[in-house]
């Protein structure tokens, strides 16, 4: 399996009039990686993808594919293939004609195309469906045809623009696995655009978290989840409880925060911000719902929070406890279900505790909109 | 009670509406088969197909149809091309300019055809002179001018039809084609054009019909190539024959035929699509069993009925000879005329008797030689009346000569009417 072709974005700026869609993006994507751009809609991730595929010329900066500058090279001359958000299968062509469109352009014979289409149909587990029209396929089947069509062009880089967003949950989860498998089989670079952190986390080697045209963090999924750079990354990826406050004391990689409503709490300063935060700074502390545990009543200290239980729900794998801390602060707690007995706390006051390494401190900043 | 009244009124309304819509066409079609010299439905004389024959003999009409077809084809090509270009530009143009552009491109529809005709003529004449070409140059050719003149507004119709389809086009399809290595020309030819094909077909039909029926623009530009509408309009001046009805009937029949054909085809596609949806993978991989052409396809059934009816009628027409009927009608007419003459003669007789009776009482002699027999005193009114009577009588006797001869010999009718034939 080849190492694949890498993609580099160098100081990439994209402007539409006065509006800055992408601000100074610097990304190195390794060849053969499954790389995701993760961000809410309108954050500029699709714009980046269009710049890579060649539909959009960057205002400043360069797109390099395999080390070659792509400036002035049109989409039909780049070694990329794009899978559109709505798939953009050609509605009047049969499935096999769709898949081998790139061969038709190059003048391949019908027999040759038919043969290649059958191979690809086998690969995407749709054997014998070549003579159907795209409208006669189900959503998941169409999805796979779009992938086959893109792969038929034998691109070095496959670009995917939220291709799973139109599918239902079950199918989406199934396609995640399938996409990852296909990527590992063909060994080419995948660049994946999504607003669904679940997709990004499960499939990607590396993820770039984007907010309003700016890339906040580039790291693997585990790092982004456990050690976010910014308040946005912490709140956008996964669920998080945020505690606002001011830093009271910095102790190496840990700090004591005077929170607005929950007293003084201790937290670990996130890796990217270590050494940059000082006493008196506005900061935000993030604790994941599953990082809380129920402590014995009356326990006090810098890693205990008291709260009143509003209501509880059972989700199967976890019990969710929705509590209200002092001053009306909402805290969500998820207790994993090990089959233990679980008593109803509704209306009671409980004490929650967390481990310091699970409480991440970042500078105060914009949170992801709910 | 109230409900049934409502239902009845709806049916009555529909009946009136369709009568209003289709009545003229039906009557026109019927007159094509009446042997009367003037297109009319009553009195019905004879079933005849002679007007179709006469239509085929009419060189001016045939030439007009030929010119209409040539001009129609030219207009289709030019209008659809211009309409498609206009529609594509409308979707690409800077949004702020779009409304203005749309108004400009639609304006020719609102301008009277007469104005378009005159301005086409004047404009191209100007160009022709600027280029120093003669009056017989290509630019002053009737077909060229008519195609150009009609296309000025027909292209706008085409654009409206094409824009409607183009708005449903997903630009991502073109992008996908480009992304897969196609050039812009390939993407246009392989993706956009096939998508637009149904709309292009509609636009072409619309353009052809609009061109075929156009009169007021063409009337200025046709030059040496009168179209069918121009020829028809000119014919009206010299009086029309049911040959025009025959032409109308042919056009109506063709329209019905193509409408049914189209309907049947659409229905068939629907059925095929439905069958494919139901088909299993094995069926699709092997041979697709198409539903039979007629199953659940009302339009196809009607189409076949229509075709059989046409063949029957044409077959009958070639075998059918209305000569006897027409002869009978002629005789009927002649008899009627004779009766009228007899009537007149009788009236004249009566008048004469009346006159004689009155003149018998009078003493003064009349100025007329026939009445001068010693009756001198005639009052002025009576004299006038007598004059009229004799005038009519004279006319009647002039006409009398032939029929009265015939009336004596029953067998003489036939040869006479045959001669007239």
Image (cartoon, coloured by chain):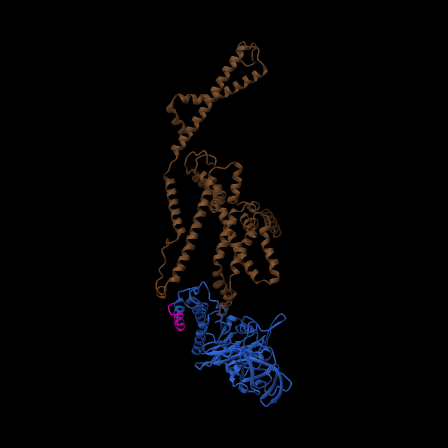
Chain colours: A blue, B brown
Tell me if I can see residue A26 in this picture: no
Q: Residue at x 45, y 77 (%)?
A: A316
Q: What span is colored magenta in the figure?
A: A117-128
Image location of residue B180, percent across then percent down: 48, 70
Furthest residue toward right: A280
Q: Is residue A25 left or right of residue B265?
A: right
Residue B211 seen in the figure: yes
- Judged left or right of residue A99, residue B89 is right
Residue B251: % across, % down: 46, 45
In the image as oriented, which residue stretches furthest toward the front? Answer: A348
Q: Is residue B308 above or below residue B416?
A: below
Residue B289 lies, with reference to residue B227, above or below; the image says below
Rendered residue at 60%/55% (across/down): B104
Residue B245 part of the magenta segment: no
Exactly how many numbered labels are in the figure? 0
Residue A292 placement (x, y as % from top left): 52, 83
């Amino acid at each position: 399996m080849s190492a694949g072709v890498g993609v580099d974005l160098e100081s990439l700026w994209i402007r539409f009039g006065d509006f800055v869609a992408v601000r100074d993006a610097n990304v190195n994507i390794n060849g053969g990686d499954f790389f995701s751009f993760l961000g809410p809609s309108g954050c500029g991730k699709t714009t980046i993808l269009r710049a890579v595929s060649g539909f959009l010329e960057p205002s400043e900066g360069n797109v390099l594919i395999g080390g070659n500058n792509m400036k002035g090279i049109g989409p039909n001359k780049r070694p990329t293939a794009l899978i559109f958000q709505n798939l953009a299968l050609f509605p009047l062509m049969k499935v096999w004609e769709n898949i081998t469109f790139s061969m038709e352009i190059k003048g391949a014979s019908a027999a040759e195309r038919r043969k290649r289409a059958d191979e690809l149909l086998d690969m995407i587990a749709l054997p014998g469906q070549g003579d159907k029209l795209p409208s006669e396929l189900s959503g998941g089947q169409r999805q796979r045809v779009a992938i086959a069509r893109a792969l038929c062009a034998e691109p070095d880089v496959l670009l995917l623009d939220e291709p799973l967003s139109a599918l239902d949950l079950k199918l989406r989860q199934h396609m995640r696995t399938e996409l990852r498998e296909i990527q590992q089989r063909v060994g080419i670079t995948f660049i994946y655009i999504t607003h669904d952190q679940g997709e990004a986390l499960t499939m990607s080697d590396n993820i770039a978290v984007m907010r309003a045209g700016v890339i906040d963090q580039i790291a693997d999924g585990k790092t982004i989840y456990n050690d976010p750079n910014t308040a946005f990354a912490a709140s956008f990826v996964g669920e998080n409880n945020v505690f606002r406050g001011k830093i009271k004391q910095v102790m190496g990689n840990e700090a004591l925060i005077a929170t607005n409503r929950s007293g003084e709490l201790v937290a670990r300063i996130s890796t990217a911000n270590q050494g940059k935060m000082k006493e008196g700074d506005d900061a935000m502390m993030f604790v994941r719902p599953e990082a809380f545990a129920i402590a014995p009543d009356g326990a006090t200290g810098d890693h205990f929070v008291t709260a009143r239980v509003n209501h509880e729900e059972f989700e199967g794998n976890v019990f969710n406890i929705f509590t209200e801390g002092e001053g009306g602060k909402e805290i969500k707690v998820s207790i994993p279900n090990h089959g233990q007995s679980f008593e109803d706390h509704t209306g009671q006051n409980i004490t929650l505790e967390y481990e310091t390494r699970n409480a991440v401190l970042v500078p105060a900043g914009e949170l992801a909109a709910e | 009670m109230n409900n049934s009244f409502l239902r009845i009124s709806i049916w009555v309304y529909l009946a009136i509406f369709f009568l209003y819509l289709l009545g003229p066409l039906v009557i026109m079609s019927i007159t094509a088969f009446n042997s009367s010299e003037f297109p009319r439905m009553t009195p019905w004389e004879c079933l005849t197909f002679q007007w179709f024959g006469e239509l085929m003999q009419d060189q001016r009409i045939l030439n007009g149809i030929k010119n209409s077809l040539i001009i129609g084809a030219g207009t289709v090509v030019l209008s659809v091309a211009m309409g498609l270009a206009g529609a594509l530009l409308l979707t690409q143009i800077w949004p702020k300019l779009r409304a203005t552009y749309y108004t400009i491109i639609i304006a020719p529809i609102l301008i009277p055809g007469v104005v378009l005709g005159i301005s086409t003529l004047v404009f191209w004449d100007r160009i022709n002179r600027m280029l120093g070409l003669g009056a017989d140059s290509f630019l002053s050719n009737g077909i060229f001018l008519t195609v150009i003149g009609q296309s000025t507004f027909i292209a706008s119709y085409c654009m409206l039809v094409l824009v409607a389809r183009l708005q449903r086009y997903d630009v991502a399809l073109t992008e996908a084609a480009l992304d897969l290595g196609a050039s812009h020309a390939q993407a246009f030819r392989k993706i956009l054009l096939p998508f637009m094909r149904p709309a292009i077909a509609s636009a072409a039909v619309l353009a052809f019909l609009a061109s075929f029926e156009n009169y007021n623009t063409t009337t200025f530009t046709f030059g040496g190539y009168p179209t069918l509408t121009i020829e028809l309009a000119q014919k009206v001046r010299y009086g029309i024959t049911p040959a025009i009805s025959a032409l109308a009937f042919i056009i109506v029949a063709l329209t019905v035929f193509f409408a049914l054909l189209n309907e049947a085809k659409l229905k068939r596609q629907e059925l095929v699509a439905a069958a494919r949806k139901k088909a299993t993978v094995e069926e699709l991989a092997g041979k697709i069993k198409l539903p039979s052409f007629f199953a659940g396809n009302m339009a196809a059934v009607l189409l076949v009925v229509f075709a059989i009816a046409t063949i029957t009628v044409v077959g009958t027409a070639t075998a059918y000879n209305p000569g006897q009927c027409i002869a009978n009608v002629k005789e009927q007419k002649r008899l009627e005329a004779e009766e009228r003459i007899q009537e007149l003669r009788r009236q004249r007789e009566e008048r004469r008797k009346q006159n004689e009776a009155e003149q018998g009482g009078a003493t003064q002699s009349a100025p007329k030689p026939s009445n001068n027999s010693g009756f001198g005193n005639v009052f002025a009114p009576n004299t006038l009346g007598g004059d009229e009577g004799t005038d009519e009588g004279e006319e009647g006797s002039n006409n009398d000569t032939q029929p009265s001869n015939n009336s004596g010999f029953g067998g003489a009718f036939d040869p006479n009417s045959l001669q007239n034939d």
